[in-house]
Amino acid sequence: MSARLNIATVDSAAYKAMMGLEGYLQTISLNHIQKELIKIRASQINKCAFCLDMHTKDAIKYGETTQRIFILDGWREAKEFFTEEEQALLAMTEEITLISDKGLTEETYQKAKSFFDDNQIAQIIMAIVTINAWNRIAVSTHLPVAK
């Protein structure tokens, strides 16, 4: 696939607004691994090769294991590899990414509340929303994966 357009150059104001969200995400209370798990899982669901490439590399840089990355798509069958807190993040990521299926269920929301306060839940939602926006930008513009 050839790239279609570069939003950063075609509409720099929109790109700057997205970068503002990225700047905000640098200030939230989630650690690097938690943020990367969200980004990788959403990118798997959205089939965004560009973001998968970027965020798996970032996760490894932050100390994530390759095994956990390899099995992330099947985390429900490999729960022993992920903490309950991470499982809550992953469930939120899936339900918000696939919002039209059933939304963020009450069960998942209550599970998240057992680990995170309201401010952290808001931050998690914003992290999920942001990576979903990046996925949509990358997939719709055919952003190429670097070789």
Image: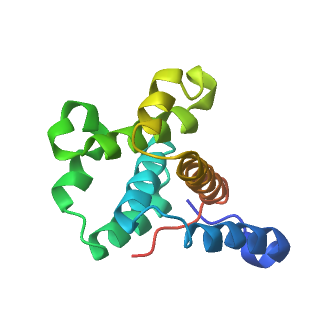
Residue found at x 30% / y 76%: 61
Residue 13 picture quarter: bottom right
Say if 140 sits above or below 91 in the image: below
Q: Is residue 119 visible?
A: yes
Residue 134 picture quarter: bottom right
Quick check: 106 left or right of 136?
A: left
Q: 30 or 36: nearer the eye? A: 30
Residue found at x 41% / y 54%: 40
Residue found at x 39% / y 76%: 147
Quick check: 100 left or right of 28?
A: right
Say if 63 sits above or below 111 in the image: below
Image label count: 0
Q: Is residue 6 visible?
A: no
Q: Position of residue 51 (x, y in %)?
A: 48, 61
Quick check: 112 left or right of 60?
A: right
Residue 143 picture quarter: bottom right
Residue found at x 81% / y 68%: 14
According to the image, what is the colour scheme of the structure?
rainbow
Q: 86 or 115: nearer the eye? A: 115
Q: Position of residue 1 (x, y in %)?
A: 55, 59
Quick check: 74 left or right of 36?
A: left
Q: Position of residue 63 (x, y in %)?
A: 24, 71
